[in-house]
Structure formats: C-alpha cells, structure tokens
Image (tube, rainbow, N blue to C red):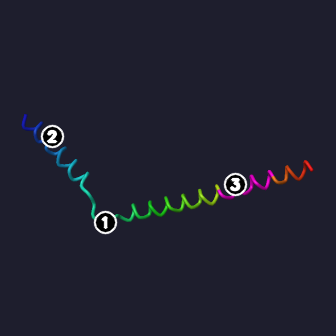
Amino acid sequence: MKALIAMFSAIALATVIGCSKQEEEGPAEQAGKQVDESIEKTRDYTSEKVEEMGEAIEQAGEEMQK
C-alpha cells in the first residue's frame, strides 16, 4: 500500500513539474519558431507565384484562342 501511495505521489509530482509554466523559451523553442516562420513565408511566396503562373497560363490560353 505504501508503495502504491509513493508511486501516485511521484506521478503527481512529475505531472506538476512537467506542466509548470516556463519563464523563458529554450533554444529549441526559439529555433522551432524560426522554422515555423520560414515555412509560413515560403508557403505564402509559393502560393503567390503559383497564382501568378495560373494567371499567365489563362492569358496565354486566351491569346491562343484569338
């Protein structure tokens, strides 16, 4: 019984420590945010260029029909 109580106490303590709010971001978190920002910028740029390419294709198609 004492072992069971000790085990649950350890789990509860680990949960509280693991879920506590960190004051500062670690280097991995900072790097992760930079990666996320880079991916977002790349996605936006790529979407813009794909849209421009689609418009150019439409124009070319219209020119061919004339």
Secondary structure mainly formed by the magenta segment? helix
| Three-letter code for the amino acid on which mark 3 is drawn | Val
Label 2 residue SS: helix
To which quarter of the image does residue 6 belong?
Answer: top left
Label 3 residue SS: helix
- Point out which mark residue 8 bears: 2
Q: Nearer the viewer, residue 55 or 31?
A: 55
For the point 28% across and 60% down, which residue is it? Answer: 22
| Three-letter code for the amino acid on which mark 2 is drawn | Phe
The residue wearing badge 1 is: 24
Q: Nearer the viewer, mark 3 or mark 1?
A: 3
Q: Is residue 65 above or below residue 1?
A: below
Residue 55's spot in the image, x, y percent?
A: 76, 54
Range of residues picked out in magenta: 48-58
Marks 3 & 1, CB-CB < 8 Å contact: no
> Distance from label 3 to label 1 (Cα)?
39 Å
The residue wearing badge 3 is: 50
Earlier sequence position, callout 3 versus callout 2: 2
Marks 1 & 2, CB-CB < 8 Å contact: no
